[in-house]
Image (cartoon, rainbow, N blue to C red):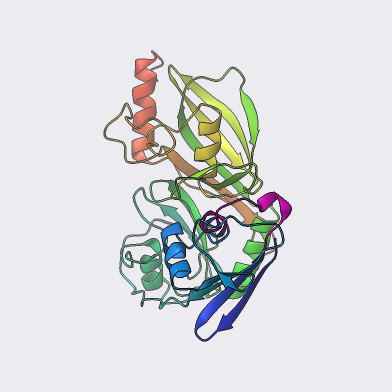
């Protein structure tokens, strides 16, 4: 598959060349898997408007692509809203002229998105850093090198300038950044540690979900280690080699150990009603500092809800400390 970007009369032109293994896929599904920022319904609207061409001819959403098809898609440029600086109590773990490390709270969205432009971490960072954030990812995600899900807590690094951003982005690409997460999952493990090596991509039918996708997924590797067995649950540490969307949640669910509280990839009726989303905490983040040139590691303590839950499970399992 080839992809080219170019601007044409205020729109972005996306071009694709269909490979042999990609043929016989509906074109709306084909494009949705390659344009993760565009919904399938939006792509269907573009087709109705004649903005999607196959071999210079308009097609319907039900068209199945064939090997060698040349696909072009004109996507109107989005008008990005103004993102305002907002004062908020950020839990800052470390800060210097290049980076700022935040211990993100549960329920906080990392960056604005259409229809959700306030109350995010970025809004708070714009206020705290007085606008001194890397501009590489545009006005919606200034300084953001990586992100964690809304209901995942823990350490996140944000860059204050483009040079630092490029250095850390390169480390992410090379998989040299240390990222350790802590989770409570369903079920017990026979072995104390293991690795899940399975590609992750967009779910074939549920667009908001990710899944193990051997055909169109990207490589994903998660190493896990059991920290404590707690009856019907386990407390584990996960270390990422890659950083795919929902990686730990998808990987653990794929081996029948979904995260406690995760109603997207786990049981729809979790045992602890007070939980807000998955029990997942980004505990350790380590990287080569962009200016100092030395390895630095930052830790975020377990949030109170996570510690209380561990104690509750220990009491149930007769392991009260």
Residue ID at (57%, 76%): 13
**Is 280 or 295 nearer to us in this picture?**
280
Quadrant holding the N terminus: bottom right
Residue at 39%, 28% (x, y): give it.
310
Q: Confirm whether the magenta stretch covers residue 286.
A: no
Residue 290 in sight: no
Q: Position of residue 249 (x, y in %)?
A: 49, 39
Q: Position of residue 17 (x, y in %)?
A: 69, 64
What residue lies at 66% left-to-right and 46% top-to-bottom?
A: 219
Say above or below: 133 vs 157. Answer: below
Q: Position of residue 103 (x, y in %)?
A: 43, 52
Q: How far across and down, in percent of the image, does residue 29 sit?
A: 53, 54
**Can residue 221 be seen here?**
yes
Instruction: Work out whether residue 154 or residue 114 is closer to the camera in this orientation and state it.
Output: 114
Q: Residue furthest left?
A: 274
Q: Can you say whether 94 is above or below 79 in the image?
A: above
Quarter-of-image position of residue 145:
bottom right
Q: Which residues lie in the magenta part?
A: 17-30
Tally the numbered discs.
0
Judge left or right: residue 214 versus residue 233. Answer: right
Most distant residue in the bottom direction: 9
Q: Please name the residue shown 64% across and 70% down the image.
A: 55
Residue 24 located within the stretch drawn in magenta: yes
Q: In the drawing, does residue 275 fall left or right of residue 9?
A: left
- Location of residue 321 (image quadrant): top left
């Amino acid at each position: 598959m080839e992809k080219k970007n170019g601007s044409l009369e205020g729109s972005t032109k996306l071009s694709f060349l269909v490979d042999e293994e990609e043929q016989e896929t509906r074109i709306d599904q084909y494009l949705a898997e390659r344009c993760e920022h565009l919904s399938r319904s939006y792509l269907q609207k573009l087709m109705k408007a004649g903005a999607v061409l196959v071999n210079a001819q308009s097609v319907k959403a039900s068209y199945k692509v064939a090997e060698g098809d040349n696909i072009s898609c004109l996507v109107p440029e989005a008008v990005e809203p103004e993102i305002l600086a907002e004062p908020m109590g950020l839990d800052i773990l470390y800060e210097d002229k290049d980076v700022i490390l935040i211990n993100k709270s549960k329920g906080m969205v990392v960056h604005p998105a259409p229809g959700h432009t306030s109350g995010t971490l970025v809004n708070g960072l714009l206020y705290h850093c007085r606008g001194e954030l890397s501009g590489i990812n545009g006005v919606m995600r200034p300084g953001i090198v990586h992100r964690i899900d809304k209901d995942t807590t823990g350490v996140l690094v944000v860059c204050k300038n483009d040079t630092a951003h490029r250095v850390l982005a390169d480390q992410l690409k090379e998989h040299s950044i240390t990222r350790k997460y802590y989770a409570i999952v369903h079920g017990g493990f026979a072995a104390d540690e293991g690795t899940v090596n399975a590609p992750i991509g967009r779910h074939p039918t549920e667009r908001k979900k990710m899944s193990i996708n051997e055909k169109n997924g990207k490589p994903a590797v998660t190493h896990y280690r059991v920290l404590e067995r707690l009856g019907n649950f386990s407390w584990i540490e996960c270390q990422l080699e890659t950083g795919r969307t929902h990686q730990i949640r998808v990987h653990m669910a794929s081996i029948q150990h979904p995260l406690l509280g995760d109603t997207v990839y786990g049981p729809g009726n979790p045992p602890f009603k007070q939980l807000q989303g998955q029990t997942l905490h980004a505990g350790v983040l380590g990287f080569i500092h962009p200016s100092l040139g030395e390895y630095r590691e930052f830790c975020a303590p377990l949030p109170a809800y996570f510690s209380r839950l561990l104690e509750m499970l220990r009491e149930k399992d007769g392991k009260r400390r």
